[in-house]
Every structure is written in C-alpha cells, then in structure tokens.
Amino acid sequence: MRFDLNTGTFVDTGLRPDQDAVIGADRTLTWQALAEEAAAWCAQAREAGFAADVPVIVRGHKEAAFFVAIAGALMLGAPFVPLDTIYPDERMDRIARTLGSHAYYDARTATFERLPFASHPQPLQEKGLAYVLFTSGTTCEPKGVQIGRESVHTLVDWMAYDFALGASPVFLNQAPFSFDLSMYEVMATLALGGTVVLASREAITQGDAFLKMLAAHSVTTWVSTPSFAQQQLLQPDFSGQGLPTLDTFLFCGEVLPVTLARHLRQRFPKARIINTYGPTEATVATTWIVVDDAMLAGADKLPIGYPKRGSEVFVQDGELCIAGPHVMRGYLNREDLNATRMFSHNGTRGFRTGDLGAVDELGRLFCHGRIDDQVKVGGYRIELLEIDAALGKLPGVQSAAAVPLRRPDGSVARIVGFVQPASGDAHSPFLPQDWKASLGEALPPYMIPSELIPRQTLPVSVNFKIDRAKLAQDYRDMQLNPSRPTEGKHNG
Ligand code: AMP
C-alpha cells in the first residue's frame, strides 16, 4: 500500500498491507493499521471541529500517533502544524494564537484538547495547504511557513525520480517533525509505500543500541543533518558492517563538511552520499548532488549541487534565489516579510533565501553562509534576534546580544549571551539564579545560551547593529587571558 497525495487516500499497490509502515517509538503500525487509524483520526478530527483548510496543531514527539495524525490531516485536507515537545507551552500558545486555533491534537494521549484562543474553527485564507511549519522569527514570534500541497508533490516526485531509493525504502526519521528535514522521510514513506523508523531523543542517545535497532529494522536510507551523522562516528558500529542494508545518506539543513563525507566514504564504501540544500520556505530542499570520491579529492568545500527538477536557482546580488512551485505560499499573516522576501519569476513563486551563493564553472552551486543573523546549531535554525529578545525580557536586563562561537570550519559550537544590566552596573550580580529556567519558558533548549556575560555596554558596528563579531572576539580573548578582569559571568 501507499498514500496517494493527489487524492488523499490509501491505495493498494500490491505491496503487502501487513508490511510495516511506521515503527514508532511506542508501537509499530502496518500499512493496513495506518490506513485504518488515519481514517479513525479523520472522524475524531471532524468531531473536534476540524475540516479542510482548518489548521491542526499536532503536538508530540515520535509516537506512532503523530504519523497517523499527519496522514489523517492530509486525508482531511487540514494543514498540519507539527510541534515537537522540545518547544515550551508558551511557544505553542503563540503559534495557536497566530493560527486562531480552537483546539490541538496531542499525539502523546491521542486526544484533541481545547484551546482558549478561538471559540470555533477558523479556516486559513490560503487554501489547499499541506502544512504550516513555524521557524525561528526575529522577534519572539515564530514565522509560519505555508506549504501548499502542490509543493509537496514536487518534493515526492523529485525523490521518486532522482534519488533511486528502491521499491520499498526504510527511512531513519530522527529530526523532530517540526523541523522540515523530517518531511523528506514522512512524505516519501507515504508516497512511495516504504517504512519509517521514528527514533526518539532517548533512543538516539543510546549509541550502540540505537545503531543495532536501525540494523534490526534494515534501514536503507539515513536522513539527518550532517551534525547528527558526525556524532555517530564515535560508534565503531556506524559502518557498512554495522548497518549492512544502509545504501543512502540524505543530508540537508547545514553545511556538509568535507571531513565528514570522507569518513563516511571510508566507513560505508557502498553507500551514496547526497548533499541537499534548501530553506523550509522552499519545501525541504531545492538543490542536490551526489558526493563521490572524485569530488572529495582535494576539496575544501562541497557544492550544494544543481537545482532539482522543475525549479530554478540563481544568484542575484550575491544572494541565492529560488523559484518554482515548491516555494511557499508565504509567511502566515506576515505581509511585511512576504513583500521583501518573495517575488514572482516566470509565472512562479520566488524566494530570496538570505544565503550567500556562487556558481562554479561546472554550474554547481555553493552556499557561503548567511547575509543576516540566522545561524544553525546542530542543524536547528535560529534567529539570533529571537534570543536577544528573550534575553531582553529577563528581569534586570536592559539589552542583550546572543553571540555564536564558531569552530575553525565556521560551524557554530555554542551560543553565549552578553547582557547589559538595567542598573548600569555590570559588576554587581543582577541576574536571577534561574535564568536558564526563565528562558526555557519561551525558548527550546537548543536556543538557550550556555552562559551569560554582563557588559556595561554592547558594542555597535558602523551600521548601528550590535557588533557580534567583536563580542565573539572579546569572548575568545577572555578565554585566552582569564586573569584579565571580566565583568562577571553567569553559568545558570
Ligand atoms: P532550514 O529552513 O531549517 O532547513 O534551514 C535552511 C538554511 O540552512 C539554509 O537557508 C542554509 O542557510 C542552511 N542550509 C541548508 N542546507 C544546507 C547545505 N546543504 N549546505 C549549507 N547550508 C545549508
């Protein structure tokens, strides 16, 4: 069986309905069970007031019911809004308020829960959306990226035609469903009739046992950020012998380091490595390239490849721009951003990525980092301004700057916060002891700075923006010369 995204129904393909579809962290569903539970979910959702074009927040982690809800929402035509439990309640409330949600689905309890933000279901203005994914915003308000069903079709068509994943691929799903990278394996499993293994946060910390679990399920397709694969290199069993059925690494979300690709080629000589690139705003990924030994020889940086079929990517004023039917329908209720970031190109939607780009003589695209203050930590997308805003709300803080500390290869190792006290005296203690817990009420753990450093004033650059590069340099100097008087430090 598989799920037909065009008709929103499960169809019989001759593949056995008793084949596993979803190996959840809690239970396993065959294709037959998935089809039945998705139909039952639709009935439950209708009773709770959901219908076509009424967005439904799905909250949970790696429960089989999360996947059921996604399939059910696609059947119903209700755009799903995935929200991992890594996000605090306050973030869900903001999202629910933006959507005007009257209820949400909790995959942990498999029930619909009422919300105080609307008395009745509210359809979105945009019709025919598949999902709305919220990413870090420059204020404390996350931005809702609206992805149409037509965009998801282009994603699965591309995967089916170009990725050669086999008749019935078995995917590793490890990224939270609220990270669009996970839509690779969610949509491909549904459309191609494969199997998906949902690996929980707990499971992925179990080293060898985690890899043995993947081997037991005969995983064929590894989907993750490069950071996650990098962590696995510590396990000797992360190899062709340990995972004998694994034939493809599908990467996206951040730079694929040359060193990681070389290690993977050594450990998995028979597996293909596919580097893909793209923002959430263009449905998971837009460019791709198979990384082979010839490319790795002598390379110091890997290309992000060529545009996927049906899309255009070009560099305009140094910025990577994307056009095609996979570009979002716009940020929800953010006409200000839509006006500056979106454009029309040859009759299709276009998006200015904010990434610096270049093309080499072979026509291969490269991504050279960001124009703005967006960073990636372990693959998670973060607007530093969102952390600034949350820090600025701590009692006693007048203003603040989140500063990424980078490794020699440019990737962000961690974030520290510089805070300017409202009292003007950076020497006397002014931060509450539990500042990490206070921040945790608004921010997910990966956005919380590892330490806070009080500063009398925050330096600004020539364009009057906070000079984060100078602060990073000051931090490095402080580390090299700890005897130098600092203004105090809070590790929370
Ligand atoms: P997200 O919306 O979370 O998928 O993040 C998208 C951003 O991640 C892009 O705009 C790039 O800055 C970065 N990114 C994604 N894939 C790659 C890649 N293969 N190489 C370099 N940067 C990437």
Image (cartoon, rainbow, N blue to C red):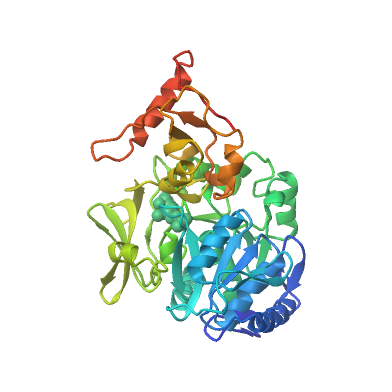
Position of 461 compared to 184: left or right? left
- Point out residue 144 in the picture as x, y percentages from the top left corner: 46, 64
Q: Nearer the viewer, residue 339 or 389?
A: 389
Quarter location, residue 31: bottom right
The C terminus lies in quadrant: top right
Position of 486 compared to 214: left or right? left
- Point out residue 490 in the picture as x, y percentages from the top left corner: 55, 29
Residue furthest front in the image: 423
- Point out residue 137 in the picture as x, y percentages from the top left corner: 43, 55
Residue at screen point 51% across, 49% down? 379
- Point out residue 166 in the picture as x, y percentages from the top left corner: 59, 69
Compared with 197, 13 (above or below) is below
Total count of labels:
0
Residue at screen point 42% across, 42% down? 297
The N terminus lies in quadrant: bottom right
Residue at screen point 70% across, 63% down? 63
